[in-house]
């Protein structure tokens, strides 16, 4: 069976994990956490074409917790609205609600399934406080347009970068453009910690609160560097520091990150070439089944996180997944748009127009794409997919 996803060279982590066990300090904020923080900080700064230094990188227990910490840090009042795409993972909307805000859906544009800046503008009200964008599939949202809107209306921008580590837009890495970047290193992402994440804070005003919030609402970070003699309860907070074991794994993965992203990009490009015609559009041969596929961003570089095929109808997608599975290939659908989910329906407004999102969760199929996938395996996947899509079965 060709799996849908396989983490890359986990064996490389053995030495670092043993180091943690030998040291005997397994709780958070030890040397491995410091290494990861430094790795990410260096990655996002030194390789940025146009330099932009994050004010702070905080390692977190998950991408979900990075989103929560960001939303708590902006201090929402009851009735404050946060605009986010309906085509998002529940964590983004949960974070808004947990932090006391109101969820307002904006629509995505059809070519990359990322939030449409024109629709953000349309949903802004006097209560709008922030925009939460999702770089779906590793393709950056249109950040210059979004930042311009945010500036005009004095809004905070939070980037959900769970799928976009090392993706860029106009020469800037995702997560370094808005006020916050929220990364995930969940076992299903490109670079894994088992469970883990990072909060990148690009504005110094939020650093102190985020640090305290992550440390159970205490000033323990100041205590750790000798700024105070004891630490105490300062504000409301929670416990979001990851284990050193998880950070040892992540550190070893971060050392492989260039290798992982290079390999995934090559595979993404090969998938793309297969489904495109000479002018770059969807090949005519596939138009009876497909609406579109993943495409490369115009002004940036995606990390090759995923490659999807979008079918006209859900039953075609289901039959395709079943056929691939019979041929030993594991392909998957993706998240149900929030407005179509049980809990998420309540946030639909009369202004919403979800014609792009309708049925996305069931019509979209992701093909296997992971760093260790060989070109031969990919060719086999494409041969099988082709047979189905041309109606030869
Ligand atoms: C995976 C994911 C998350 C959640 O990250 P965790 O580390 O699993 O909590 C949030 N948003 C998006 C877009 C994701 O893909």
Image (cartoon, helix red, strand yellow):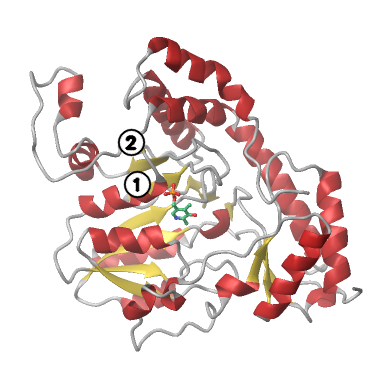
The answer to whether residue 176 is visible is: no
**Residue pictured at 72% horizontal, 56% vertical:** 330
Where disc 2 sits, the SS reads strand
Residue 159 image position (x, y, % from top left): 39, 54
Q: Residue 387 or 166: which is nearer the viewer?
A: 387
212 relative position to 152: left or right: left
Reading the image, the residue beneath label 1 is 66
Residue 320 image position (x, y, % from top left): 76, 70
The answer to whether residue 254 is visible is: yes
Figure label count:
2
State yes or no: Cβ of the residue under disc 1 lies below 8 Å from any atom of ligand 1: yes
Cα separation, mark 2 vs mark 1, equals: 9 Å
Query: Circle 2: is it few (<14), some (14-19), or many (20+) Cα within 10 Å?
Result: many
- Quadrant in which the C terminus is drawn: bottom right
In primary-sequence order, the first of circles 2 and 1 is 2
Do labels 2 and 1 touch, CB within 8 Å? yes
83 relative position to 297: left or right: left
**Residue pictured at 51% horizontal, 35% vertical:** 47
133 relative position to 95: left or right: right
Q: Quadrant of residue 288?
A: bottom right
Residue 17 image position (x, y, % from top left): 49, 20
Reading the image, the residue beneath label 2 is 58
Q: Name, please, the residue furthest toward the bottom.
A: 350
State yes or no: Cβ of the residue under disc 2 lies below 8 Å from any atom of ligand 1: no
């Amino acid at each position: 069976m060709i799996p849908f996803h396989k983490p890359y060279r986990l064996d490389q982590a053995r030495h670092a994990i043993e180091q943690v066990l030998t040291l005997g300090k397994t709780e958070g904020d030890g040397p491995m956490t410091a290494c990861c923080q430094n790795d990410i900080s260096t990655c996002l700064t030194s390789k940025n074409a146009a330099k932009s230094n994050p004010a702070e990188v905080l390692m977190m227990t998950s991408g979900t917790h990075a989103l929560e910490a960001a939303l708590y840090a902006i201090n929402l009042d009851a009735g404050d609205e946060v605009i986010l795409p309906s085509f998002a993972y529940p964590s983004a909307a949960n974070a808004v609600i947990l932090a006391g805000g109101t969820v307002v859906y904006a629509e995505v544009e059809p070519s990359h399934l990322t939030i449409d800046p024109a629709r953000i503008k349309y949903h802004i009200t006097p209560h709008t406080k922030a925009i939460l964008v999702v770089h779906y599939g590793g393709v950056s949202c249109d950040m210059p347009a979004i930042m311009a809107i945010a500036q005009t209306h004095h809004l905070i921008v939070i980037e959900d970068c769970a799928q976009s580590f090392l993706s860029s837009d106009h020469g800037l890495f995702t997560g370094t453009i808005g006020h916050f970047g929220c990364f995930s290193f969940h076992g299903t992402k490109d670079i894994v910690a088992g469970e883990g994440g990072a909060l990148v804070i690009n504005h110094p005003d939020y650093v102190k609160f985020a640090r305290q919030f992550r440390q159970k609402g205490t000033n323990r970070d100041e205590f750790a560097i000798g700024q105070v003699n004891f630490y105490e309860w300062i504000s409301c907070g929670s416990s979001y520091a990851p284990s050193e074991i998880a950070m040892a794994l992540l550190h070893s993965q971060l050392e492989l990150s260039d290798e992982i992203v290079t390999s995934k990009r090559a595979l993404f490009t090969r998938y793309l070439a297969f489904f495109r015609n000479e002018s770059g559009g969807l090949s005519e041969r596939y138009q009876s089944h497909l609406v579109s596929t993943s495409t490369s961003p115009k002004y940036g570089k995606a990390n090759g996180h995923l490659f999807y095929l979008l079918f006209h109808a859900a039953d075609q997608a289901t039959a395709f997944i079943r056929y691939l599975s019979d041929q030993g290939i594991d392909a998957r659908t993706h998240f149900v748009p929030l407005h179509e989910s049980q809990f998420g329906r309540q946030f639909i407004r009369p202004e919403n127009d979800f014609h792009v999102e309708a049925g996305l969760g069931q019509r979209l199929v992701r093909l296997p794409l992971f760093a260790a996938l060989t070109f031969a395996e990919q060719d086999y996947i494409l041969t099988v997919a082709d047979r189905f899509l041309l109606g030869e079965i």
